[in-house]
Amino acid sequence: MNNKLCISSMTPSQLSEYMAFLGQPAFRAGQIFKWLSLGVDSFDQMTNLSKDLRQKLDDACYIEMPQLLRKQVSAKDGTIKYLFGLRDGNSIESVLMEYKHGTSICISTQAGCKMGCIFCASFDPARSRNLSAGEIIGQILMAQKDSGRTVSNIVLMGTGEPLDNYDNVMDFLDIVSAPGGLNIGMRHISLSTCGLVPKIDELSDKKLQLTLSVSLHAPNNQTRDKIMPVNHRYPLEQLIPACKRYFNKTHRRISFEYAMIKDVNDSTKDAYQLATLLSGFLCHVNLIPLNKLPGSPLIPSTPANIRKFQEILNSKGINTTVRRSLGGDIDAACGQLRRGKSSL
């Protein structure tokens, strides 16, 4: 954008500093922030700003707003999957889901992902890049504008590893939770990570009241090494203590995500190992029936195995639920999102 600034990536404090730099009164930052949170895509729409200021902003800044390339609606449950285009030709997917407690959106934090989990469709190291805060929040604004719904819950579980894009994700959290904007509280936000231990510790120091969801998917290093390359760098001996440190600092219960894969991690022995691994730790285990990927040899556990696995964990005092799958008929379920026009 010819060195223009992305104004929609600015946090409220950054926007205030920028208005001061332009010699504008402090209240202008709040006015502009409100317009951006309404999803405007041009400065001309900010009608309570002077024409002179709008022109200055247009000369120096741009508003990041993804382009809607495709929309799919599940015939089973009404879940909506969006394919959004970005300025550099990349594209990302987001999923809008309706629950009794409100409207949730699953958003992407990177275009592509380099983590390489074998059960996930998002792996694409060749074109992986971080999304800006404006590109992240733009997914919510576009989904609201298209659907007419108000998002009340956010899950950062789309394409990408949020903690691998730490600074931009922190700016996004500042923007999306700020009064005068979308004002979505931290307790209505879940952030998923495959287990980047140093970043978990860094996040814990912020003491945010969001829900940290850790993609565990195996009860031992031998199995986790095979399905999650990140485990070679941050094995369970490092990950679990980091999770406990996070809980001790934030007092927020961690949710462990566990994809149930037939003959890989779903045996009775696996269940007892997992119960031992998490013993004495206030946490929640979310069992996820594997969503089949084209060309993958991995297949979902049987419903009977999933029930037995859950019963064992519950009997050992580990709070365990089975995730309800939404949007499977449009490849919008957990692990099925991918980046780029390859999904067209």
Image (tube, helix red, strand yellow):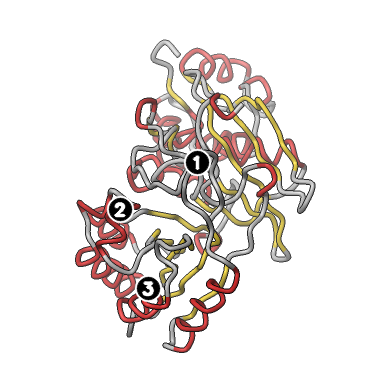
Q: CA distance from mark 3 to mark 1?
A: 31 Å
Position of the C terminus, as image quadrant, is top right
220 left or right, relative to 333? left
Residue found 48% across the figure and 62% down from its top: 262
Q: Nearer the viewer, residue 14 or 238?
A: 238
Q: Which mark is residue 292?
A: none
Mark 1: which secondary structure? loop
Please tell me which of labels 2 and 1 falls first in the chain. Answer: 1
Position above or below: 10 against 4:
below
> Which element carries disc 2, helix, strand or loop?
helix
Disc 3 residue type (three-letter): Asp
Quarter occupied by the N terminus: top left
Q: Residue at x 43, y 63 (%)?
A: 263
Tell me residue 141's x, y (percent).
63, 38
Q: Which residue is mark 1?
A: 108
Q: What is the spatial separation of the Cα atoms under label 3 and label 2, in whole angstroms? A: 15 Å
Q: Is residue 210 visible?
A: no
Q: Residue at x 45, y 37 (%)?
A: 133
Q: Is residue 182 above or below residue 10?
A: below
Name the residue tied to disc 2. 226
How much space separates mark 2 and mark 1, taking CA atoms?
Answer: 25 Å
Marks 3, 1: nearer the viewer: 3
Query: Mark 3 vs mark 1: which is more N-terminal?
Result: 1
- Packing grade of label 1 (10 A; few <14, some 14-19, many >=20) is many
Give the labeled residue for mark 3: 270
Q: Position of residue 140 (x, y in %)?
A: 61, 41
